[in-house]
Image (cartoon, grey):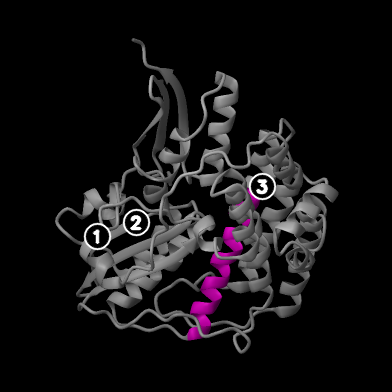
Amino acid sequence: MSDPAGTLNIQLERTSRGLTCRIASTRPVTAADLFAGRAPAATAALLPLLYSICAKAQAFACVASLEGASGRLPAPAVVARRRRMVSVETIREHLWRILLDWPRLLGETPDRVTMAKILSLVKDLFRLSDPEGDLFRPGASSVVLDRRGDARVLADLDDILARQVFGAHPARWLDEVRDGGGFDRWIETVDTPAARLMRGLIDADEAALGQADVTGLPDLRDADLIALIDAPEGVDFLARPTWRGVARETSPFTRRAGCGLIRDLIDRHGRGLLSRLAAQLLEVALLLAEVRRERAEEMPDPLIPPVPMMAGIGIGRADAARGLLVHLARVERERVTTYRILAPTEWNFHPRGILARSLAALPDAADDVLRRRAELLIMATDPCVAFDLTLSETRV
């Protein structure tokens, strides 16, 4: 089945007043209409196949919206296990960038061998967490985790990341690189591609590139999301979402901006390129630590979707790799009547959003330099779809 992703067309134009950025999207924001008329169980089974990018996050938001619309509350252990799988998926998505795209931006060869090993380990973790493949079915019950097998796979993953990404066991890296001083020591003593990229940005005076003052998306209430998404003009909102008339950001950077390391980097280098890439790296280590702690009795009670405020309508949220993912489902007589998806890409690649403003803030430079810097910022914002980047110049 094809992925209904669409393409982002990004045009960076030189004008007499500096750079301007235009972003046009071909993403079909109403593609989820095809679920209308289906039973909730069939919808939950089909949706992650159709939306294959971040399929676990899509499945999490989907089943939460369907269970909410039905007034069905899952057991805390089920939600915790589902959330764990989303975390593993987010680790995989960040490592895809770190191991394949970051070396290319350094002029080096992508580490496809290591990434293939990681994909295999992630597949094993998914199987161990959901051996029957029905964890994201509405009304699913929790299963016992094979803790010995799970610990073995996580140990293998730790070993790979220690060699190829962090230069130390991820937990040790978290302990040592907890602030700007630790980060400085890390990039000066470790020679992985991730450390070289960070060091290179500082040496080239590119760490602060793309600073833009775009406010993070607040924690919106379900009632507010329903009012925006389910309104007559809801399709327009899905295509170009704003909150209180302003484009917002939802990303690993906004999730981790309050961490000590990222706060220090923002103080030193602003809310630009280095701080954003470092947030992705930090999130890998933090999520690994959370995944290791996955014992229902040791974890805080996860947030349980509330009983719906409106009969037959539910909201599901997932902290996907690229930001907050929201699903809305309306169910009547055991059939889906309305289905809507609000993806983080529409927030972050809004025509007036963080990427557009970051690119417009770049200093002008030769085409090859400008293109490289623009691609760095696009990668730091991390689209979930293909993009075309065009450089042009206004002729007078």
Magenta segment main secondary structure: helix
- Residue 312: give its label: none
Q: In the image, is 162 to the left or to the right of 325? A: right
The reply to whether the C-beta atoms of the residues labelled 1 and 2 are less than 8 Å apart is yes
| N-term mark: 1 or 2 | 1
Q: Which segment did they paint magenta?
A: 76-96
Going by the picture, which residue comes out furthest to the right?
189
Residue to which mark 2 is pinned: 342
> Mark 3 sits on what residue?
98
- Tell me if residue 86 is in the magenta stretch: yes
In the rendered image, the residue lying farthest to the front is 267
For disc 1, the marked residue is: 229
Could you classify mark 1 by the number of other residues whose Cα lies within 10 Å: few (under 14), some (14-19), or many (20 or more)?
many
Q: Name the amino acid, label 3.
A: Ile
Image coordinates of residue 377 in percent, x first then y, are 54, 39
Separation (CA) of disc 3 from disc 1: 34 Å
Q: Amino acid at mark 2?
A: Leu
Judge from the rendering whether residue 347 lies leftward or rightward of residue 80; answer left or right: left
Q: Is residue 361 above or below residue 14?
A: below
Q: Residue at x 58, y 37 (%)?
A: 376
Q: In which quarter of the view is residue 174 placed?
A: bottom right
Q: Secondary structure at mark 2?
A: strand
Alpha-carbon distance for marks 1 and 2?
8 Å
Q: Is residue 366 magenta?
A: no
| Disc nearer the start of the sequence (3/1) | 3
